[in-house]
Image (cartoon, rainbow, N blue to C red):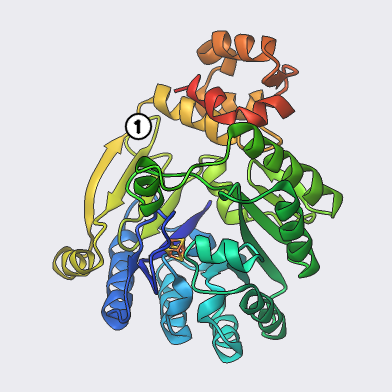
Amino acid sequence: MAFSLYVHIPWCRAKCPYCDFNSHAAAAWPEDEYVAALIAEMRARSANPAFAGQKIATIFFGGGTPSLFDPRSIAAILEAAADRFGLEADAEITLEANPGTVDSPKLAGFRAAGVNRISFGAQSFNPETLRFLGRIHGPDETRTAVRAARRAGFSRLNLDMIFAVPGQSVADIMADLDATCALEPDHVSAYNLTFEEGTAFFTEMRRGRIRPLPSDEQAAMYAAVRETLPSRGYAMYEISNYARPGEESRHNLTYWRAESYLGIGAGAHSFARDAAGPGGRRWWNERMPAKYIDAVRKDGMAETGGEAIDSRTAASEFVFLNLRLREGFAHGQFFRRFGCSPDEVFGRQIERLAADGLLADDHSRIRLTERGLEMADSVFAEFV
Ligand code: SF4
């Protein structure tokens, strides 16, 4: 058995107005103290029976903006992970990077540290859209960063895109997709902009200063993305993710397949599927970076909450996470995990959603139909 490790780096140069991640705008940050805390937390977690004795299959540095950190810090974290747990020979090690925070030496440093996959938050190639989104980079910085990453030896490269930004048209989306494909990433994540509570955009929306695009326009944009990327060689394998053959994000597949992962750092969440009973256990860390560092100094960990998951909840999470995948899940997978067929737990919902044309169930696999993809959130709600 092997597991996935998530490492949260909680700082950004500026806070984007749509972002509800645990990220804090800062001009300076206590990098050495934070790295020491991450390493100490790993040491403490390596005794956890859910992960002890297992190697790491994937590591993901997410944020925030992990590319703000010095490559030496990333190397120190990776060395500690290898030391504490061991890395599988072909471990996938991804780092999220903001194109406005990297140059050639830095990218070469990340590659030398052992990072073998880089994910750039490109979001758009339209300068006005990027300004509206509060991004600190322009389209040319993304192009330069991608070229520098290739030179640094990154053969695996993702570009994150956002669509359904107020003011955008389908033609704008097509132009963004053209610009994205021209850079030949092997993976593209394309997210529909959402207005999450607690963000500046949410407040602006409440005040009537910005208005989300009408839902039919958003659906047309999603359809354009879903049709265009596969036609350029990027198969859709998840609701928002597209990859060339074999280039799917193994780390994110861990989440969608409801497998175990260890999250370290401020606000990180973890899940151990075989801990604390049939449904597993999840827990989460202190969100504020300074408090996280203090807690780890004192106790070796900064866990502020956790819960055992009952089997019904675990089954429901398994279904709606796996349904995010284009291949859905096999009846047999569900049976092996929960000791019964999905029909025994969710027969009514599956039958109704299949009758409504939202789910396809051939009694071997269950997955979303094309229509189900467009109404995914309401499908998932049926299983909660
Ligand atoms: S750079 Fe990313 S994590 Fe940071 S504020 Fe913007 S969207 Fe959020």
Q: Which amino acid does label 1 sit on?
A: Ile
Q: Using the image as rendered, state which of residue 269 and residue 173 is in the foreground.
A: 173
Residue drawn at the location 39% of the way across and 55% of the way down: 21
Whether residue 89 is visible to the viewer of this picture, yes or no, is no
Q: Pointer 1: what residue?
A: 309
**Quick check: 233 above or below 155?**
above
**Quick check: 299 above or below 240?**
below
- Number of marks drawn: 1
**Quick check: 339 above or below 127?**
above
Q: Position of residue 209 (x, y in %)?
A: 41, 47
Q: Position of residue 342 (x, y in %)?
A: 57, 18
- Residues packed near mark 1 inside 10 Å, few (<14), some (14 to 19) or many (20 plus): many
Q: Quadrant of the C terminus?
A: top left
Residue drawn at the location 80% of the way across and 54% of the way down: 245
Q: Where is residue 23 in the image (x, y as percent from the top left)?
A: 36, 62
**Ligand 1 lies in quarter:** bottom left
Q: Using the image as rendered, state which of residue 322 and residue 225 is in the foreground.
A: 225
**Quick check: 38 above or below 367?**
below
Ligand 1 within 8 Å of disc 1? The answer is no
Q: Using the image as rendered, state which of residue 129 and residue 258 is in the foreground.
A: 129
Whether residue 190 is visible to the viewer of this picture, yes or no, is yes
Lateral position of residue 372 relative to residue 72, left or right: right
Residue drawn at the location 68% of the way across and 57% of the way down: 188
Q: Where is residue 353 in the image (x, y as percent from the top left)?
A: 62, 15
